[in-house]
Image (cartoon, helix red, strand yellow):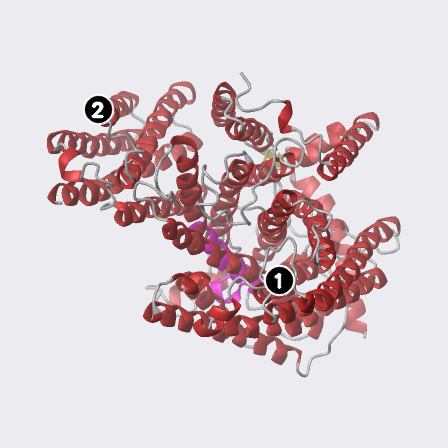
Amino acid sequence: MLGKLDWSAIPFDQPIPLVAGGVVLVAILGVLAWVVVRGHLPYLWHEWITSVDHKRIGVMYILLASVMLLRGGSDAIMMRIQQAVAYQSQGYLPPEHYNQIFSAHGTIMIFFVAMPFVIGLMNLVVPLQLGVRDVAFPTLNSVGFWLTATGALLVNLSLVIGEFARTGWLAFPPLSGLSYSPGVGVDYYAWSLQISGVGTLVAGINLVTTVLKLRTKGMNYLRMPMFCWTTLASNLLIVAAFPILTATLAMLLLDRYLGFHFFTNEAGGNVMMFMNLIWAWGHPEVYILVLPAFGIFSEVVSTFSGKALFGYRSMVLATMAICVISFMVWLHHFFTMGAGPDVNAIFGIASMIIAVPTGVKIYNWLFTMYGGRIRFATPMLWAVGFMVTFIIGGLTGVLVAVPPADFMLHNSMFLVAHFHNVIIGGVLFGAFAGFEYWFPKAFGFRLDERWGKAAFWFTFVGFYVTFMPLYIAGMLGMTRRLQHYDVAAWRPWMFVAAFGMAVLSVGVICQIMQLVVSIRNREALRDRTGDPWDGRSLEWATSSPPPVFNFAFNPDVRGEDAYWDMKAKAQQQSLEHDEPEYQDIEMPRNSPTGFVCAFFATIMGFALIWHIWWMVMVGGVGAFATFVVFAWRDHDEYVIPAAEVARIDRVNLEERRSLVSMAGAV
Amino acid sequence: MSMTATAGHAHADPHHIGLVIEHPGPASKRIVTAYGFWVFLLSDIVMFSCFFAAYAVLVHQTADGPKGSEIFEQRNVAIETVCLLLSSFTCGMASIAADVRNRFWFYLGMTVTCVLGLIFLVIEFREFADLVARGYGPSRSAFLSSFFSLVGCHGLHVSAGVLWLLTMMAQVFAKGFRADVLRRMMCFALFWHALDIIWVGVFSVVYLLGSAV
């Protein structure tokens, strides 16, 4: 009846996950109770859960990422403490548990923090920058988000019901095969990634179509803001790479569930094929994450330098070059596994070549700043911090791309330091920059600058104190994933890293404080003009937060930096315009399809993990029925009357005119 | 003013030879839907290519089990191929019928497509069941694992296609040829034709090359 599920699945003998799970459960129940008692449930349901508005969905993605960042961060803290105390002793974590923690940390940070964060920002901003009302497929967008949330839920469920994988974040066979991992850990891993992977693919298709087919009049390819270009590149990579992950995990699951022999040691299975397949997805994945961050830095650097982006066209070219080359380097992840010198040399050279377009980008940002009027607001701090940090990460990357050097550094702490260097210094700094930069657009008030700067400095310094020692430990021969060790030389560096982790945590607390303080002072921080940073692209041309239809009129674009041009022209010409003729606007209706579909997907995923076959059927039939019901509805749009559009738009126009005339007077 | 500016460009450059062509604005819903679905199909083909690659890597790993030439029956495969190619034609007829809003020919075209699809599935299922009964199931060898997965994945797509086909017929029955129903029909047709293209790959790589080994 319940498959493999029984009381032994709940780890009563392990206090840490049980207490953590209990606390989370109490917190969730508390929030739910508060929502219900205060009568917020209808609001949440109608305005957020069933919303198909790309801005709301973007915000929900970022919220999911932030919550999971805390979860993944707690795992990181536990690991740093373990390695600091586990010199010639077992430390405080049993090996079983420690292995689950490092696997969960990697899985969560990549799939449920970095991915939702960048997809959230792209969802929030790209339609605004393109000057359109919505993404290509609004309801599908909601489905994509909720499926991602399902994946995150399943990973967290593994904390209290059953176990998580002990295989590392990519679950290499044969360790992840049935004979070496007979428990449900790998199944949790694989099904949560399969489900959230579908969500990611949907988001990718949606954003590719949006950028290629839904641009406002005059928004030629070479007038698109840089963030739209990197979004396009990143989502093309999603569409091309995520099906590889789906296929690979499907093969792994067939091995585990039905005794197939793709990756087993018997009957002709081939483990190296898993390495090739998973990294053919995994390497582009790195660029799926970092390309949007590059786009954010381009926007931020140009805005806060008060200059157009230097070398716009070379930036476009570099972005698309990275998009293509990132598919040609995957083998550098297993130089040491006997592919031979010729193959290694080719992939080593390809890996080094990718540094060229990346270098082009760095120089372009530097030249954008050169001679500009730079304002060091918080987003700009993250951008400058990124440039320094990412160069170090990139240089160590080129070092590891040299096959002979890689033979020494493979699977060492040096490697751990390198990829944290680029992922934190690149993706996370970019996510934070974008968060600070676009927060006023999403919510209509700015974030507190003092707490923001404190968060930056603690995170920045904390990052260096944590990860530079790991480079040294790697040089001293320390390998990754060690539960305990006997080499005295490594110990001081582990202490420094643990201290750095504490500094980083202060940065996180500052970030939370920043939110709390800003929300409390939101009236003082209110942005009435919709253009708090003196921005250059179209998202700043509408009010903050934007109305549900984004723009009362689809903007007409005449060049790069569309909104900057509009402001300049408005200053030259007289500001007195006649009232424009407003028209009715059709917008897509809200739909619970995404939420209901994810509900059934959760049931199905859970049932598959525990082999509860009747429940799998329930989930599958439910998900299909949801789509049929959705396909059967008669009215998928509603009309906002012209008078209502006019009422909403007039307020914004007034504010904007006073802003421009003030700027003109100066 | 902006209208005239764009129109002026169009006149100055009637054949769109110049580099600067003003983007006319968002595409129509029909184009956006079809485009998005194309992108999905491309991603689906990437997924299939992984199974093709796995098959190519594992095709000789028979673990002393049967080789392809010992288990493939050309006659079955030929019937399957004919069914699928014919069904693509009838699906095309149904699409045209939908475009001219002719219910009779639409239902007829879709019904024949469905029947042909089901015949394909029955033959494939019997082939699989027969192999398993002879002890040549997917867990016999890595070669058979990859064979069952690649061909089975295509079969799974055909099954989903049949389910979708029936849903489309019900939709036309209940809603008529509404714009959104027509857009879905267009996506279904793309999907069905794509299955054909993938089958040509399966047919060539698995059955034709496999029989020669």
Q: Residue at x 52, y 62 (%)?
A: A229
User: What's drawn in magenta, residue-wise?
Assistant: A218-240
Q: Is residue A398 above or below residue A591?
A: below
Is B169 in front, or is A381? A381
Is B4 in front, or is B36? B36
Q: Is residue A134 visible?
A: yes
| Rendering quarter of residue B185 | top left
Percent x, y of residue A227: 57, 61
Name the residue tied to disc 1.
A420
State the SS at label 2: helix
Percent x, y of residue A105: 63, 49
Q: Relative to residue A649, is residue A595 drawn left or right?
A: left
Residue type, label 2: Asp
Q: Relative to residue A587, is residue A608 drawn left or right?
A: left
Q: Is residue B132 above or below residue A277?
A: above
Circles 2 and 1: CB distance less than 8 Å? no
Name the residue tied to disc 2.
B130
Dot label at residue A253: none
Q: Is residue A229 magenta?
A: yes
